[in-house]
Amino acid sequence: MHLSDFSYHLPESSIAQTPAAERTASRLLVVSRGSDAPARHASFKDLPEFLREGDVLVLNRTRVVPARLLARRDDGLEVEVFFVRTL
């Protein structure tokens, strides 16, 4: 696995800025591993139909502190920093 495996175009409009009003309405991207089938979109409420016996479901209950810092370095490069916890 290489870091470049995780490089892809993500339009800014696709990055959630707030949680879905109804949690079960959250979007879910479904990828069939070992298949040439294209990824497809579903809703979080559809998750049970994709789980099989023996699968492991990992829950991430972390939250992002709603703090973002935008800056520009001396060389002109724009930098965006997200704060994820208070120290």
Image (cartoon, rainbow, N blue to C red):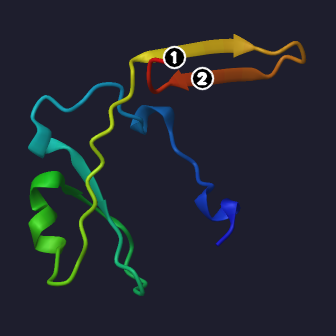
Q: Is residue 49 above or below residue 70?
A: below
User: Residue 22, image x and y in percent?
Assistant: 9, 34
Q: Which residue is mark 2?
A: 81
Characterize the local packing of mark 1: few (<14), some (14-19) or many (20 or more) Cα atoms within 10 angstroms. few
Q: Which quarter shows the N terminus?
A: bottom right
Identified by mark 2, the residue type is Val
77 on left or right of 21 = right
- The single residue placed furthest to the right in the displayed view is 75
Identified by mark 1, the residue type is Arg
Q: Which residue is mark 1?
A: 68
Q: Is residue 42 above or below residue 68?
A: below
78 on left or right of 60 = right
Q: Residue at x 84, y 17 (%)?
A: 76
- Asked where in the image residue 66 lies, by quadrant, the reply is top left
Q: Earlier in the sequence, mark 2 or mark 1?
A: 1
Q: Give the tally of numbered discs.
A: 2
Q: Is residue 75 above or below residue 8?
A: above
Characterize the local packing of mark 2: few (<14), some (14-19) or many (20 or more) Cα atoms within 10 angstroms. few
Question: Helix or strand or loop: what does disc 2 sit on?
Answer: strand
User: Residue 20, image x and y in percent?
Assistant: 19, 32
26 on left or right of 84 = left
